[in-house]
Image (cartoon, helix red, strand yellow):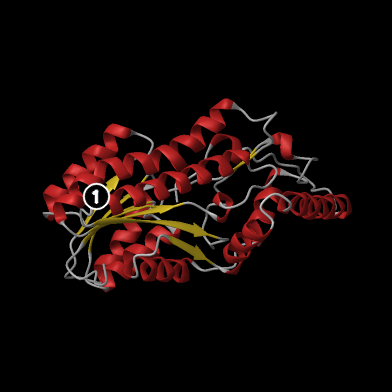
């Protein structure tokens, strides 16, 4: 799909980050958009921006949870009815979880699997019939550099992103065999400057093991975000135009891909060494920091999280 003009794209996680940037850049290219997010406030702001920069583009929105199958299928059907067709589905919504496997709460694991994996499955299955009916369709599923190699303390996130990778690579092969006018791309972003870190869940079992505090864990995660959402969106759309099977975003994702290829088993020892080093530095910084006058407890990581 080399041209997005007069196409129709559906985007999950459109209320912020890469989803918002994709909506803006597609609208600038003349593509009509159907936007979804769990965060209604962020979604409304994306809609306002898109309408301001592309007044001739049709925009529809839906507040939903991508983990709810019926809601996703209803949104897909309504998008096709309102816009007359659907050409692209960007299954972009995602959340993060940091926890040891032993200490992981099943509620947290179900939360991340429902959004990161089942959200992609629901989006793909709900929209695929409409994409095939259009005769010119594309499925774009967001995995991660953590869908290429694993890291301690990220098993839930790793599991979902590896699952998205396998699901999408299998989908692409099936579509190639069908020759139905639809293709698929798996996206592997590195650290993207979005709100996913601050909206992530950091389990208490990580404190003292890999991080000095729950908030420090989020801040450290965010420190490695080196690519802007706008640059990420441009890379994704370029990959769709070129019908790429896999899109790596950022030098960190490219480095992870190289490392996993060159040292498919031995890379794990290198990751353990680097993670131990970073964890030790974090504990030393925490020990040197003065205690706050009024200590506060931030439990947002255990109680919430945003799809982005």
| Nearest to the observer: residue 45 or residue 82 | 82
Check the image and report above or below for 11 versus 302.
below
Q: Is residue 65 visible?
A: no
Identity of the residue drawn at 54% across and 27% down: 107
Q: Is residue 183 left or right of residue 211?
A: left
Check the image and report above or below for 218 versus 261.
above
Q: Position of residue 151 (x, y in %)?
A: 67, 47
Specify the quadrant of the image occupied by residue 153. Answer: top right
Q: Secondary structure at mark 1?
A: helix
Check the image and report above or below for 160 versus 4.
above
Identity of the residue drawn at 69% across and 35% down: 100
Q: Is residue 170 visible?
A: yes
| Nearest to the observer: residue 76 or residue 48 | 76
Quadrant location of the N terminus in the rendered image: bottom left
Q: Position of residue 97 (x, y in %)?
A: 59, 41
- Mark 1 closeness class: few <14, some 14–19, many ≥20 residues within 10 Å: few
Q: Position of residue 182 (x, y in %)?
A: 25, 55
Q: Position of residue 243 (x, y in %)?
A: 34, 65
Q: Is residue 133 left or right of residue 104?
A: left
Identity of the residue drawn at 61% across and 65% down: 252
Q: On the image, numbered disc 1 is attached to which residue?
A: 178
Identity of the residue drawn at 36% across and 68% down: 237
């Amino acid at each position: 799909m080399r041209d997005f003009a007069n196409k129709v794209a559906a985007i999950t996680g459109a209320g912020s980050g890469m989803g918002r940037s994709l909506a803006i850049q597609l609208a600038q290219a003349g593509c009509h958009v159907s936007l979804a997010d769990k965060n209604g406030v962020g979604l409304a702001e994306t809609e306002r921006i898109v309408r301001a920069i592309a007044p001739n583009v049709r925009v529809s929105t839906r507040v939903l949870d991508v983990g709810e199958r019926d809601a996703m299928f209803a949104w897909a059907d309504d998008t096709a009815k309102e816009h007359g067709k659907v050409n692209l589905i960007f299954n972009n919504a995602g959340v993060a979880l940091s926890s040891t496997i032993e200490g992981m709460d099943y509620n947290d694991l179900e939360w991340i699997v429902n959004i990161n994996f089942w959200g992609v499955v629901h989006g793909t299955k709900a929209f695929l019939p409409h994409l095939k009916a259009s005769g010119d369709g594309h499925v774009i599923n967001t995995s991660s550099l953590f869908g290429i190699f694993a890291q301690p303390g990220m098993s839930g996130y790793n599991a979902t992103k590896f699952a998205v990778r396998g699901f999408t690579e299998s989908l692409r092969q099936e579509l190639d065999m069908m020759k139905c006018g639809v293709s698929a791309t798996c996206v592997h972003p590195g650290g993207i400057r979005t709100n996913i870190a601050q909206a992530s869940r950091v389990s208490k079992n990580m404190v003292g093991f890999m991080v000095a505090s729950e908030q420090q864990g989020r801040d450290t995660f965010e420190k490695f975000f080196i690519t802007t959402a706008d640059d990420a969106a441009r890379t994704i759309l370029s990959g769709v135009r070129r019908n790429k099977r896999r899109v790596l975003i950022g030098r960190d994702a490219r480095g992870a891909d190289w490392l996993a290829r060159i040292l498919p088993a031995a890379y794990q020892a290198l990751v353990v060494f680097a993670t131990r080093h970073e964890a030790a530095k974090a504990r030393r910084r925490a020990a040197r920091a003065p205690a706050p006058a009024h200590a506060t407890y931030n439990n947002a990581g255990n109680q919430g999280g945003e799809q982005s």
